[in-house]
Amino acid sequence: MECNHILVRFGELTTKGKNRKTFIRKLCQNTKEILSPFEALTYELAYDRMYIVLNGENKDAVSKALSTVFGIHSFSFCYKVTSEIEEMKKACLHIIETNEGNTFKISTKRNNKEFEMRSDEVNRAIAGHIFHNSTKELKVDVHQPQILIKVEIRKDNTYIMDNVIYGAGGYPVGIGGKALLMLSGGIDSPVAGYLTLKRGVDIECIHYASPPYTNEQAKEKVLDLVDVLRQYTHGKIKVHIVPFTDLQLAIYEHTHESYAMTVMRRMMYRIAEGIAQKNNCLAIVNGESIGQVASQTLESMGVINEVIRMPVLRPVACMDKLEIIDIANKIGTFDISVRPHEDCCTIFTPKQPATKPKSYKAEAFEKNFDYAEMVKNCVENTTFLVVDNSYKKIDNLF
C-alpha cells in the first residue's frame, strides 16, 4: 500500500463566502508555480480541499516547498482508498503496523453524509479490525494517542492519514494586489516583506544604491534577501535599483546634518511613489519599527510620510527587535542581513539626527536645491532585474 497523496487544507480561506472561489483559484495557481520543479505531480480540487498526487516525486522535498505556500493551513500525506469500510480497515491496519507506538485513536470525518455508517460507528469498526488483526499489543487512548489516524470519508474516495504538517497560513500571494517594498538590506525590511506576502499582497522591491559609497556586495546582499523572499511567492520578484548617489550628496550639501536623514527619507518616499505608480503597486511597504531609530519616531514618520499620498504599510511597526529577529531566523534572512555591507541609510549617519522634526524646517532645507528634478531623474533612470530560478547561475550573475 502506497502513501501517494497529499491532502491540503485551506484554513482561513473557507470563511471567504462569495469570494471563496477566487481565493482558492489563486491558491491553486500559486501552489502549482511553487511546486513546478516537481514535474510529475498532479492536482485534484474539491470544495474545501486540494489533493496532490506525488507520482514518485520526493516526499520530503515536496513537503518543504509546500510549507512555504501562503494560504495553506495544513497538509497531510495520506492513503486514498474507495469509500468502503473494508478498504478503510486495511489502510488503518497498515498504518498501525508500520508506525511505532502501542496506543491509538481513530478519528473519522464523514463529509459524505450519505455514507451508511455514522462517524462513531466507523471508528468502532476500524478499531475492532485493528485489535483482531494487529501483531501488536494495543489499546485505545483518546487523549494522547501515540498514533492518531484521521479518516475523511468523501463520496467516491476516502483519505486516511496519521500526520498533520502545518503550512504557512495567511492568504494566497497576489489576492490582495501588489505593493512596493523598500528593501534596505537590514533585518527589518525583509521581515516586513514576508509579513506582507503572508496577507496575500504580492511585492516588488526597491533598493537605493549610492556607488561608490555602496558597493556590489551591498547590492548582492539585497538580491540574496529577495532570493529568499521569492520562495514564498510564485517564484520570482522584480527589483528596482535606484541611482541615488547624486541626490544623496545634494541632500547632505544643502541640509543641516540634524535634518539630513529626515529629508533623505522624504526623497526616498517620493521616488518610491513614482516607481510604484509606474508598476501598478497600490502601496509602499517598509520595515519601520516605532522608536527604533531617529527616523522612526511618530513625529519623524509624520513629517516623512506627508510628501506622498500613497498608503504606507509598516508590518513590523509594533514589534520589538527580538520579535523581528525571531522571524528573520525562521524565514532564513537573518544571516544575510547581518553581512557587514553598508547601505545608503548608514553610510552618512548624522551624529545627532532630529527625533522630532518639523515639516516647515524640512521644507525650508528642500528649497535650497532643485530636488524635484533630481527625484524625477532617479525615477526615470531606475533599472530593474528579476530574481527567479536563474538567479546566480554563472551566465546570469548581474
Image (tube, rainbow, N blue to C red):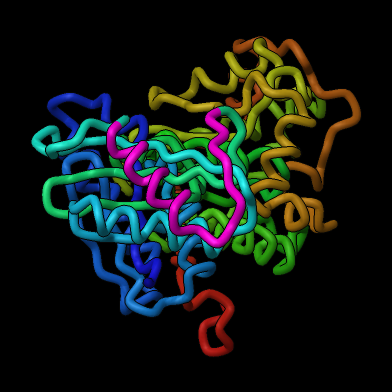
In the foreground, 369 or 44: 44
Q: Is residue 118 visible?
A: yes
Residue at 46% x, 69% y is 388
Quarter location, residue 354: top right
Q: Which residues are magenta?
A: 121-142
Residue at 77% x, 15% y is 355
Q: Position of residue 254 (x, y in %)?
A: 71, 33
Q: Position of residue 24 (x, y in %)?
A: 23, 43
List the single residue furthest toward the front: 132
Quarter location, residue 363: top right
Residue 25 in the figure: left or right of residue 289: left
In the foreground, 350 or 67: 67
Residue at 59% x, 57% y is 136
In the foreground, 285 or 136: 136
Q: Is residue 274 visible?
A: no
Quarter location, residue 292: top right
Residue at 36% x, 37% y is 124
Q: Position of residue 43 (x, y in %)?
A: 24, 63
Which quadrant is home to the C terminus?
bottom right
Residue 129 in the figure: left or right of residue 300: left
Is residue 356 in the magenta section? no
